[in-house]
Amino acid sequence: MPTYTGISSEAFRHPLDRQAEQALRSLPGFDLIARKFVEFVYERPQLVYLMGNTIQVGPRQYSTIYQIFRECVRDLDIYPEPALFVSQNPQVNSYALGQDNPYIVINTGALDLLNEAEIRAVLAHELGHIKCGHTILIQMAMWAMSAASVLGELTFGIGNFVTQGLIYAFFEWRRKAELTADRAALLVMDDLNPVMSSMMKLSGGSIKYGNECSLQEFIKQSESYQALDADGLNQVYKFLMYSGAQGMMLSHPFPVERVHFLREWAVSEEYQQIRRGNYQRSPASGAVNVTADSPENEAEALRRQVEELQQEINRIKQSE
């Protein structure tokens, strides 16, 4: 499998990802959300939770998965090596988060359903998010939406800025970022089939009846889904489904759409040039960056946050 020494994330970044991020950053409230996120949210609690509730992958722990993971890290030229955890969860899922200490979590459901090539494709996909710096923006989106929907007025000064438009823009960007990460998976695999079959299994794979699933039929389904756009009303339905018409906005494109976009890129001149070694090079750092206005000791920051929250709670009790 190819190794892309020194490759920049911009070499394979999907233009829709870049466009959606620019639109997100231009919206009122984004800069404030960025500052508040860095001020109030830290990676350490999440890592503490993972250390206490999952299995950290290493040379003597899930050694086969670790070897696959290290090869993917090498092929995408990512340094330092992120942490990898296995979570006891039957849902076929994985995710990448963190900026200073990025990490990937893959569920046991994914390990049980996917073969080794498909697991490699999934890990490469998540590493693509880290390579492109997506993880900090994903965390920021999750925090902003949680603050707006759960905490109400207790949003540490962001309540009036987390508009429906900003939330929509976060989701729109997250969906487009997946297209870039899919490209990273294809670069590592140099083979469309395992990347697409992992998407098929994510859609409705079965351990018991997996031998009755056909990747070619799933590709035909993808083509049929794209053909639905010939009817303008279907395009409206698609937009509404992505935008929460069924109760919640979707953070990922439908797998059949991801297959469509990836198949297009696989036959592009851009992909062929990268395979030949003709690609943009830069240090292994992501494009997305969110920085604090001024550095602050974590313990002191946490103490201050608790005090501010307690003051707000006391204020609400007094006003009742």
Image (spheres, rainbow, N blue to C red):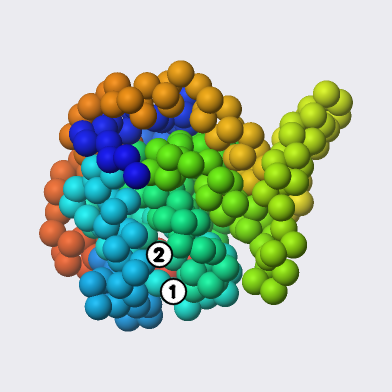
Q: Position of residue 269 (x, y in %)?
A: 46, 18
Q: Amino acid at mark 1?
A: Ser
Q: Amino acid at mark 2?
A: Val
Above or below, 65 against 243 in this view is below
Residue at the image point whose x is 27% and y is 57% from the top:
70
Q: Position of residue 146 (x, y in %)?
A: 50, 57
Residue at the image point whose x is 25% and y is 71% from the top:
58
Q: Which residue is mark 2?
A: 105
* Helix, strand or loop for disc 2: strand
Q: Pick whichever, 228 or 176, lies toward us.
A: 228
Res 320 → quadrant: bottom right
* Helix, strand or loop for disc 1: strand
Q: Residues within 10 Å of mark 2 (few under 14, many from 20)?
A: many
Q: Which residue is mark 1?
A: 87
As drawn, which residue projects farthest toward the bottom? 52
Instruction: State if disc 1 and disc 2 touch (CB < 8 Å).
Output: yes
Residue at the image point whose x is 37% and y is 21% from the top:
273
Q: Pick whichever, 286 or 249, lies toward us.
A: 286
Left or right position of 233 against 35: right
